[in-house]
Amino acid sequence: MTLDELPLGTPARIVSADWNVLVPEEAQRLRALGIEEGAEVRLAYRGVFLARDPIAIEIGRMTVAVRRVHARAMQVEPVAATTA
Amino acid sequence: MIAALVGNPNAGKSALFNALTGARQKIANYPGVTVERKSGRMLLPSGEPVELVDLPGSYSLNPSSPDEAVTRDVILGRMAGQAQPDVLVIVLDASNLEQHLVFAQEIIELGRPVVVALNMVDLAERDGLVIDPAALSSALGVPVFPTVAVRRRGIAELTAAVAALRDAQADDAPAHRPHVTAPERRMLARQMARGAILSETAQHRIHAQLDRVFLHPWFGPPVLLALLFVVFQAVFSWAKPLQDALDAGASSLGDVVRGALPASLLRDFLTDGVIAGVGSVVVFLPQILILFFFILTMEATGYMARAAFLMDRAMAGVGLSGRSFIPLLSSFACAVPGIMATRSITDPKDRLTTILIAPLMTCSARLPVYTVIIAAFVPNTQVLPGVGQQGLVLFGLYVLGVLGAMGAALLLRRTVTKGEASGFIMEMPKYQLPTVKDLALGLWQRAYVFLRRAGTMILGVTVVLWLLLNLPRAENPQDQVNASIAGHIANGLAVVIEPIGFNRDIALALIPAMAAREVAVSALATTYAVGQSDDAAQGQALGEQLKAHWSLATALAFLAWFVFAPQCMSTIAVTRRETNGWTWPAFMLAYLFGLAYVAAGVTYWTAVAFGLG
């Protein structure tokens, strides 16, 4: 499952990311924000009205807005809710 | 000695910078790049002044934007014209340590003298997070001080620590630390954050609850729309009494001068030229301040990033991203700060496109022009209960500007700024209450820029225009405009603009209005005042004069012209500065004047076809 398909509110871990499909600067920015392999994330908001873009991801105590194309490059697997 | 603030975006660096330096700030550019250099004077406990530099927020020393490159170069002492800071103050968001400690470790590894400001501890506590600064300090191996920059808490301790570091520098050179890889740093950050957190209660974060409304796919957009409606409503209705007062002040000052001096060229110069000209511009100060009040508040509270999120989809439709929304919204006040705000857009093509369309947002300088023309030519009737025809026309002009900007963005993104669709990655800052002091400082800086402009450039232009209109003197006062130098120039220009329904008087107004749009009003006022022989006619309202000299078609064409025409020297100058050359300002002038000419022409001939000529 890719990150953009994750149901809202479900905690999940990023298991792999296809960095090559992203613009290098954006890939670097995502990594700098901790959105990379091993990170535990939650999809908080998806889109405005009927659109499914952009997406707000909760990671740790941060909320980060990304585009769907970024989320689609991330493979995730749901995890049992932990402290986050 | 120089100290520098460094940290992730949204660490509260700017608030800390304000708290440490007060109003003693200097804002300039780093040489060769369009990255803002903010510096100020911080006082050490001994009273000794220290230069404090606020470095652009960064996630790492491996830059992914020009801002981050500047931060790296300054920290490493590689920035030309900027001495390496002697002390680095790392600013951390106390409630987001896991993230902020990654960059902090990278800085500490450099072995420079470092002190950490554990900022926004109040917000962390609000989120149920209690942090032990001592534990964090021993984990990092550098001093850590809790601060609440917006409430000026912990500031004295922090400056004392900077002073202590400076004094210690001579004896013990800080040791280099082992370098670790980025994933290791992230793991360490997680461990250190966990070790420093004394207690943590379940998620009852206020910002998550606010986001439930503000970022809601169905409720969020109407809330944003309602907020924008309030903003524009306030800009027009709240400002009205203040504007009337300023207006009355200017005209009574004119009356006093007229009464005190004998009738002469000098008296006319002072009343019709200086006081009327500058007065007609200064009346817009209340509107500008009200608009900036809302924009600064939206930024300081953290709402602006939510607005960017909500607008991203719409902006993506014309090839931009949510990041462009903030500069474009600011451009409704004035394109100059709007264009400066494009610095937060990381993608260069995206940024250039936003700069090029920013002048199409209806800035406050267009208001005087719109208001005068609408009041004179559009009947003050109700179309629907509570909806007047005049307001509707004004709203239509705003919409026309936005539509023009969207169309222009679409075209530009397919031609001159062609490139990959821009992305949108943006951290949502935490919500917080802004402080009156920070807001007041921001407003004062805006007011100062505006008044300086009114006092220098606009005054200068008004005076020159008045002289050109009054020299050489005509035999018969009725012929003064035609006989003057300005009249001759305008007669030449009139040939070019007659096809779009403009007359000689408009040509006279458009030339000085190249300096700033609002000058068109004072220029028209000056032109029609000079053309009148007796005092009674001079006192006649500008609106009456316009109705006597212009057809409705001409007035409408004039409005359409101002929707597009880039008549603003400051915008051109700031575009040159922000794009590092004359290419883009020249392009901007050409395409916007082209649009203005076509729009005015189409409006005029359509109106004439409907019998309004």
Image (cartoon, helix red, strand yellow):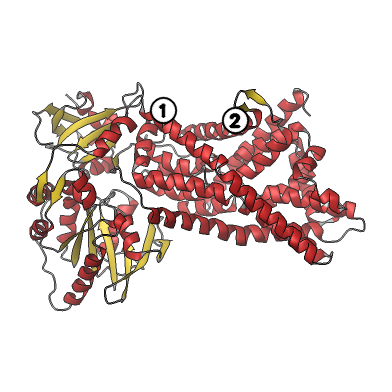
Q: Nearer the viewer, residue B303 or A12?
A: B303
Pick the quarter of the image with the N terminus of chain B: bottom left
How far across and how far down the image is residue B379, in percent?
71, 30
Residue that label 2 marks: B396
Q: Is residue B555 above or below residue B91?
A: above
Q: Is residue B324 above or below residue B137?
A: above
How far across and how far down the image is residue B243, in percent?
61, 48
How far across and how far down the image is residue B47, in percent?
31, 76
Q: Is residue B275 visible?
A: yes
| Left or right for A26, reference B461 | left
Q: Nearer the viewer, residue B98 or B46?
A: B46
Identify the amino acid type marked 2: Gly
Q: Is residue B295 above or below residue B88?
A: above
Asked if both marks, 2 and 1, belong to the same chain, the answer given is: yes
Q: Is residue B566 visible?
A: no
| Label 2 Cα crowd, 10 Å radius (few <14 / some 14-19 / many 20+) | few
| Left or right for A3, reference B380 | left
| Left or right for B379, reference B70 | right
How far across and how far down the image is residue A11, in percent?
14, 30
Chain letter behind tag 2? B
Label of residue B441 in the image: none
Q: Mark 2 touching mark 1, by CB under 8 A?
A: no
Mark 1 element type: helix
Pick the quarter of the image with the C terminus of chain B: top right
Q: Distance of mark 2 from mark 1, alpha carbons? A: 20 Å
Q: Is residue B227 above or below residue B581?
A: above
Name the quadrant containing residue B404: top right
Mark 2 element type: helix
Residue that label 1 marks: B222
Residue at image coords 30%, 56%: B151
| Label 1 Cα crowd, 10 Å radius (few <14 / some 14-19 / many 20+) | few
Chain letter behind tag 1? B
